[in-house]
Amino acid sequence: MSAQNPVFIPGPTNIPEEIRKACDIPTLDHRSPAFARMFKPAVAGIRRVLGMQQGEVIILPSTGTGGWEAAITNSLSSGDRILTARFGMFSHRWIDMCQRHGLDVQVIEAPWGMGIPLAEMEAALRADTSHSIKAVLATHNETATGVKSDIAGLRRALDAAGHPALLFVDGVSSIGSMPFDMAGWGVDIAVAGSQKGFMLPAGLAILGVSPKALRAMDSATLPRTFFDFRDMLKAYAAGGYPYTPAVGLIAGLAKSIEMLEDEGLSHVYARHHRLAEATRRAVAAWGMSPCAATPDLYSDTVTAVVVPNGCDGTELVQLAATKYGVAFGVGLGEVAGKVFRIGHLGMLSDVMLLSGLATAEMCMADLGWKVQLGSGVAAAQDYLRKSANAALAEA
Ligand code: PLP
């Protein structure tokens, strides 16, 4: 018998049985009223999860990367100037995409493990007195390093500089797991994917688009067809899609939102925080530290654990997969080998997390790393036991 272990990669996440079943529906005509009845609540739910007050939700058959492409091609033109920061693999890939689209990208470099450098961003915005920067791009949760950035602070920087640039936020590994306030933070386009906080298989790019970003659509000339918001919005108004949607995933999305809201979004966020904190306690007990430089940067969805000198994080990930059938995330780019990543997002309980921490410890011992078996697990258990009552009382 082979039992299915939970995964501890930072997405795709574990899929609840209810969501798997919800995705598994007979063929349904996507031009029928039955599809519209299923789609509308999903869209309404996304508005609540994103904290949207105005604008439109766009759900594309794609992934987070497609969501990025949709964001830039629907709002910008070749040669447009954008401002962003590079501090990890995903912020880097977004920059690369913008450059390949012929955008003029002003990049502020920050060490991997740091977040968006707000002061430098504000200085760059203030220096742009002619307001040639059309958009500011921000990775809310840098999944490669486990770093959460301050999007409210970035909005304050834009406002303090009196700069009218659009604000685009990659929330692929934060939305649905960590607080996100599109209206409060003045986000113009928010990008999410189905396979992280929404606990679905990969296959949907989910975007919130502000009225200001919708207005930019008319003058934007970057080529787009499959991702053209104008086609999507026209088809939505008629209750459908401009092409064949991923009907099963949309059925699953409606269930996912129902589950998130049944738990209560604030409780979902608190659960993620608690599991993240338990992970960090384990990491400290192993004598290691998160890649995120300071506690204000700690992500509640993924911890990139810096491994001791002479150890290779990728070896641990490979061993966990081959010997124990458990998936952790490898280090990417600049931190390849230097970290391994523990994803703690989506459907995850205390007990599931403890099994992952125990597996990581077994791998460390197998690899001859200096770690005492049980040390991290005990630290996490201690924290989880003590915080469990508070979590239940709040539920
Ligand atoms: N942005 C972030 C922060 C991510 O973590 C990921 C994927 O892990 C992406 C973008 C790319 O999303 P996808 O793999 O769904 O295309």
Image (cartoon, rainbow, N blue to C red):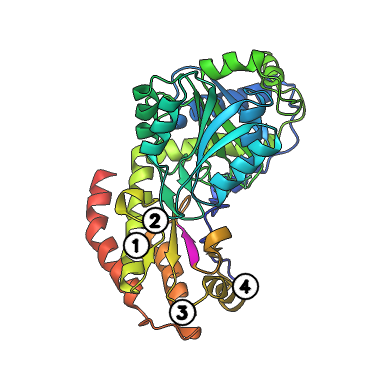
- According to the picture, the residue beneath numbered tag 1 turns out to be 280
Identity, as a three-letter code, of the amino acid under mark 2: Ala
- The magenta segment: 339-343
- According to the picture, the residue beneath numbered tag 3 turns out to be 364
Q: Tell me how far mark 3 sits from mark 2, CA to CA.
A: 21 Å
**Mark 4 or mark 1: which comes first in sequence?**
4
Identity, as a three-letter code, of the amino acid under mark 4: Ser
Decide: marks 4, 3 in contact (CB < 8 A)?
no
Disc 4 packing (10 Å; few <14; some 14–19; many ≥20)? few
Q: Tell me how far mark 3 sits from mark 1, CA to CA.
A: 16 Å
Image quarter in which the C terminus is found: top left
- According to the picture, the residue beneath numbered tag 2 turns out to be 292
Tell me if 75 is positioned left or right of 185 in this view: right
Disc 3 packing (10 Å; few <14; some 14–19; many ≥20)? many
Decide: marks 2, 1 in contact (CB < 8 A)?
no
Picture coordinates of residue 346, whole percent (x, y) = 48, 50
- According to the picture, the residue beneath numbered tag 4 turns out to be 2
User: Which residue is nearer to you in this view: 130 or 93?
Assistant: 130
**Mark 3 or mark 2: which comes first in sequence?**
2
